[in-house]
Image (cartoon, grey):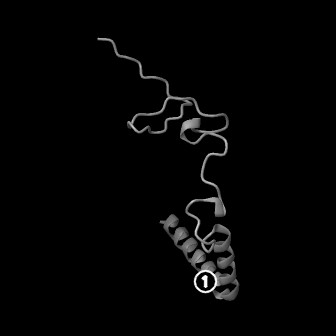
Amino acid sequence: MEQSEAPDLTGRCLARTRRGTLCLRWPSKGRKRCRLHGGAPGSGAPRGERHGRYKNGLWTIETRERQRQEYLAANPWIGALRTIQELLAYADELKSNER
């Protein structure tokens, strides 16, 4: 009996189709997926208010980062506590490497 050779899948899209099989199309230039599976220019949801699930902007990446910075500025002891935790973790790592 002859063994059939498996197809060379190197460089293919390989996204899962609705049938559960792999997509064998070539990806779009500079992308990992073909144009049908997210490789088209401009693919993906728009950012901000143009996105369909946008609510009010309270939980955007920029707002959350700004809130985090404000919290750290108002509570300077948190930065010191994180430094102490990092030092303790480093000391534990050194102890485990000595054993």
State how many labels appear: 1
Residue 94 position in % (x across, y down): 55, 69
Q: Is the residue 46 above or below the residue 81 in the image?
A: above
Observer-nearest of 8 and 65:
65
| Residue under the image location 63 percent in, 73 percent down | 64
Q: Secondary structure under badge 1?
A: helix
Identity, as a three-letter code, of the amino acid under mark 1: Leu
| Residue under the image location 62 percent in, 46 percent down | 43
Question: Which of the 4 quarters of the picture holds residue 78?
Answer: bottom right
Observer-nearest of 92 and 55:
55
Residue 42 position in % (x across, y down): 66, 45
Circle 1 packing at 10 Å, graded few (<14), some (14-19), many (20+), is few
Q: Does residue 53 appear to the left or right of 6 in the view shown?
A: right
Q: Is the residue 16 above or below the residue 69 in the image?
A: above
Residue linked to disc 1: 81
Q: Quadrant of the N terminus?
A: top left
Question: Which of the 4 quarters of the picture holds residue 49?
Answer: bottom right
| Residue under the image location 68 percent in, 88 percent down | 74
Looking at this rendering, what residue extends furthest in the left direction?
Answer: 1
Residue 98 position in % (x across, y down): 51, 66
| Residue under the image location 41 percent in, 39 percent down | 18
Residue 93 position in % (x across, y down): 53, 68
